[in-house]
Amino acid sequence: MKNQINDKDKLADKIESEDKKKIETVTKEALEWLDENQSAKKEDYEEKLKEVEAVCNPIITAVYQKSGTKPSSKSEAEDEDHDEL
């Protein structure tokens, strides 16, 4: 996700700066949480992922709708979230 919002070939030029900041904040917080909670239960990881997706997915969906394209298979936002987390 972090890479997508900074890559000019992907979302960097299509996403509003306020939305970009929201994504950067939530991904930074999630990565910090991961560092601090390496021994957390699977359910805790899944809950944190849902929190990130709740912020990122609506933004990414709106970007794709605005540009008239759709993410390829699953939501690319979901794919990137899984890569980051």
Image (cartoon, rainbow, N blue to C red):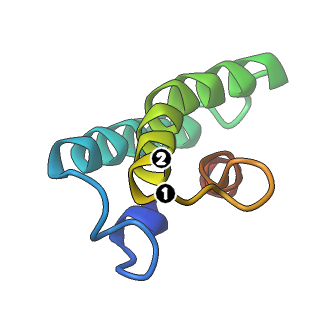
Residue found at the far bottom of this picture = 9
Q: Secondary structure at mark 2?
A: helix
Instruction: Give the crowd class for mark 2: few <14, some 14-19, many >=20 residues within 10 Å.
Output: few
**How far apart, in angstroms, are the residues tagged by discs 2 and 1?**
5 Å
**Front position in the image: 77 or 30:** 77
Residue found at the far front of this picture = 68
Residue 77: which disc? Answer: none
Q: Residue at x 73, y 31 (%)?
A: 39
| Residue 52 at x, y percent in the picture | 52, 32
Residue found at the far left of this picture = 17
Vertical position of residue 16 compared to residue 42: above or below:
below
**Front position in the image: 31 or 60:** 60
| Residue 25 figure quarter | top left
Q: Do the CB atoms of the residues marked 2 and 1 lie less than 8 Å apart?
A: yes
| Residue 15 figure quarter | bottom left
| Residue 29 figure quarter | top left
Q: Residue at x 17, y 42 (%)?
A: 18
Residue behind mark 2: 65
Q: Secondary structure at mark 1?
A: loop
**Front position in the image: 14 or 65:** 65
Residue type at the position of mark 2:
Gln
| Residue 32 at x, y percent in the picture | 44, 41
| Residue 84 at x, y percent in the picture | 60, 55
| Residue 85 at x, y percent in the picture | 64, 47
Residue behind mark 1: 68
**Front position in the image: 78 or 73:** 73
